[in-house]
Amino acid sequence: MTRHPRRIRDLAVFLEAVYLRFHRSATVSEDPLSIPSAYGDPLDREVMGFVASAFAFGRVSAFMAKLSCVVDRLGDHPAARMAGLDAAGCREVASGLRHRFVGEDEIASLLLGLSHVVRGSGGLEPPFLRGFGPTGDVMDGLESLVAELWPPPEPTDLPGPGFLVASVRSGSPLKRFNLFLRWMVRDDGIDLGLWKGVPPSALLIPLDTHVDRIAQHLGILPRRRSGPRLAHAVALTRALREIDPEDPARFDFALSHLGISGQCRGRFHDAVCADCPLEAACRVAVGGVSSRSR
């Protein structure tokens, strides 16, 4: 991965403007973060944070509807409920649920893995720290956590969580894992800040299609036709560290909601682009006919 083609410090003022506009607690209602945020107990927040991040692919409205079903079935104390579930109980909770290409067997497998971790380790942070602690690398922490989630210790005919718990070394950007870590580690009144053993400086950007597209428009990442990879998440995080070395992932929530809200459409639109805090720095807006130039 080559160095980002534009000096990131030249973009700092624009990125801070996006941060100020979108990094607001009111925006959480439109985000999967609203699922764990609804609980008071830290362990409930942790396990439902993992479930919510695992489902966070495809249209937001679609996966939020499926998450609402899971929430209803697990009740007011989901961590305690999960801890008491065996394979048959997990199948019952997941019965009839499907999100795109993920079916009830994969959902039941995810719940069974979480049940095992809650019972055996008391939560998800301890197995993560077993991998993260010696190296300070979130990839090692995630690999350790995934090893605890699957396979479960009890005999079962469940096929495994599949896409819901991705392979850490696949080269994908691991958006959902890094989203979960952002929620757990950062503490700013929006993210939950439950894990104190991981510094925010260690996080990687949860690189989704919105953030990837905007980073390309700004010249932070090179233009390409292919989708985002882990190398792009690493490059974008490294670039944002030049603005905020201690907390580069703080820009993620705002940038993603610039895309989710429809205020960045990925193509020039005079009225929309003119109202965007990134307009003067964006290659799409600059390449269009800005209303300010008329």
Image (tube, rainbow, N blue to C red):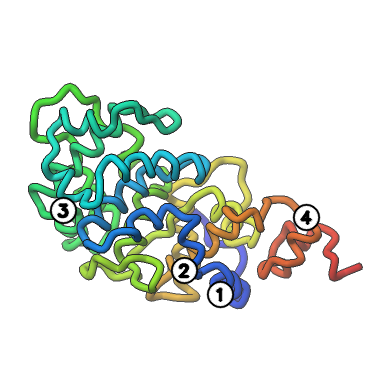
Label 3 sits on residue: 127
Q: Which residue is mark 2?
A: 25
Determine which quarter of the picture holds residue 259: bottom right
Measured in 3D between alpha carbons, the distance from the residue under mark 2 to the one under mark 4, in whole angstroms, is 28 Å
Horizontal relation, residue 273 to residue 229: left or right: right
State the residue at coordinates (74%, 60%). 272
Check disc 2 and give the amino acid type: Ser
Q: Is residue 167 above or below residue 133?
A: above
Of tags 3 and 4, which is closer to the observer? 4
Q: Quadrant of the C terminus?
A: bottom right
Q: Would you name the residue on which mark 1 appears? A: 20
How would you rate the neighbour count of disc 2 (Cα within 10 Å): few for under 14, some for 14-19, many for 20 or more? few
Which amino acid, mark 4?
His
Q: Earlier in the sequence, mark 4 or mark 1?
A: 1
Q: Is residue 269 left or right of residue 145?
A: right
Is mark 4 in CB contact (under 8 Å) with mark 1?
A: no
Q: Which residue is mark 4?
A: 269
Q: How many marks?
A: 4
Tag 2 near tag 1, CB within 8 Å: no
Q: Is the residue 81 above or below the residue 195 in the image?
A: above
Is tag 2's residue or tag 3's residue first in the polypeptide sequence? 2
Q: Nearer the viewer, residue 120 or 218?
A: 120
Residue 117 badge: none
Instruction: Pinpoint residue 91: horizontal percent, then vertical percent.
Output: 22, 29
